[in-house]
Image: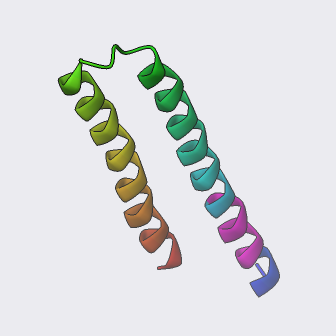
């Protein structure tokens, strides 16, 4: 396998990780809008889920570079 193909695979993997994060963030934002404004625990749980996906994708990206 040439270096170009390896770079292409890494690029596709990076784009797929980015797409999952963007999809999940927008989905969670839409669900968060349906929560009532006084539902602090629900809003915090929603924020925690988004942050979990973002930070786990950071680690996934780091593993991808290896």
**Residue located 43% across and 70% down the image:** 63
Judged by its main secondary structure, the magenta piece is: helix
Q: Nearer the viewer, residue 21 or 38?
A: 38
**Residue 24 position (above or below residue 17):** above
Q: List the single residue furthest toward the front.
A: 38
Instruction: Please identify the quarter of the rendering in which residue 35 is found.
Output: top left
Question: In the picture provided, is 56 more to the left or to the right than 27?
Answer: left
- What residue sits 47% from the left and 79% below the top? 66
Q: Which region of the structure is painted magenta?
A: 6-13
Of all residues, the one furthest to the left in this rendering is 41
The image's colouring method is rainbow
- Numbered-mark total: 0
Query: Is residue 10 within the magenta segment?
Result: yes
Q: Is residue 56 magenta?
A: no
Residue 26: x %, y % from top left: 57, 35
Q: Where is residue 34, by image quadrant?
A: top left
Residue 44 in the image: state x and y as whole percent: 24, 34
Q: How far across and how far down the image is residue 17, in percent?
A: 57, 53
The residue lying at 32 percent from left, 39 percent from top is 47
Residue 41 percent across, percent down from the top left: 18, 25
Quadrant location, the N terminus: bottom right
Q: Nearer the viewer, residue 24 or 40?
A: 40
């Amino acid at each position: 396998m040439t270096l170009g193909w390896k770079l292409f695979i890494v690029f596709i993997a990076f784009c797929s990780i980015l797409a999952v994060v963007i999809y999940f963030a927008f989905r969670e934002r839409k669900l968060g809008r349906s929560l009532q404004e006084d539902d602090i625990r629900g809003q915090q749980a929603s924020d925690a889920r988004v942050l979990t996906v973002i930070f786990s994708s950071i680690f996934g990206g780091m593993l991808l570079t290896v």
